[in-house]
Image (tube, helix red, strand yellow):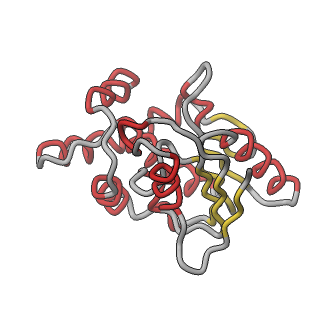
Amino acid sequence: IAGWLYGRQMHGIRLGLENITELLRRLGDPQRSFRSVHVAGTDGKGSTCACTESMLRASGFKTGLYTSPNLTEFNERIKVMGEDISDGRISEYAGKLRPIVEDMDAKGSRCTFFEVTTAMAFMHFRDEGVDYAVVEVGLGGRYDATNVLEPDVCIICNISLEHTEYLGDTVEKIAYQKAGILKKGVPCVTLN
């Protein structure tokens, strides 16, 4: 299972919402089963996510946390109530995802590692019945796989030059990509 999942990395980075939207549709749109806080930016995303999740948990909510990349183990990317997803759950979800992803591959829609991992996180949050998931953007925002969420609040941390080959060569162009997580009527908190 790990070989199949990590093998998705050969599809590289592909920004866009078509694949993740279709993948999640085939899974029953698990991202619609929980409320969320969506976090973008260059610096401070991980800390902001951890603090936000901790505050929500301390307030009595059942929480999920999705961050990337992992530091030591894949499991730490996906947490419920502060606990890493188990190896058994990863295998279970990979088993459910694999035939769907391979069918999409056969039809020319090759899902990336991050798209599959994002779907896995959202499935886990649905199955565990989380109230709120705090979700970190993987790259940019506007075309990131996590941008299928309809969050209760968006947070945009500090922005600086990064991933210029994907996001643009100025802070303004990068800020435009990060601001892509904003949704009409959804409050946004910015950090400087």
Across and down, in percent, residue 177 comes to 46, 54
Q: Is residue 165 above or below residue 153?
A: above
Quarter of image, res 182: bottom right
- Would residue 31 appear left or right of 26 to someone viewing this image? right
Quarter of image, res 156: bottom right
- Would residue 104 appear left or right of 113 to someone viewing this image? left
**Which residue occupies 53% across, 48% down?**
137
Residue farthest toward the left in the current orientation of the protein: 107
Q: Nearer the viewer, residue 102 or 56?
A: 56
- Would residue 142 appear left or right of 53 to someone viewing this image? left
Residue farthest toward the right in the current orientation of the protein: 58
Quarter of image, res 130: bottom right
Q: Is residue 2 above or below residue 162?
A: above
Across and down, in percent, residue 147 comes to 46, 58
Q: Quadrant of the N terminus?
A: top left
Q: Nearer the viewer, residue 67 or 185?
A: 185
Q: Is residue 149 above or below residue 50?
A: below
Total numbered badges shown on the rendered structure: 0
Across and down, in percent, residue 28 comes to 39, 64
Q: Nearer the viewer, residue 149 or 74?
A: 149
Across and down, in percent, residue 36 comes to 63, 62
**Which residue occupies 71% across, 53% down?**
63
Q: Nearer the viewer, residue 14 or 175?
A: 175
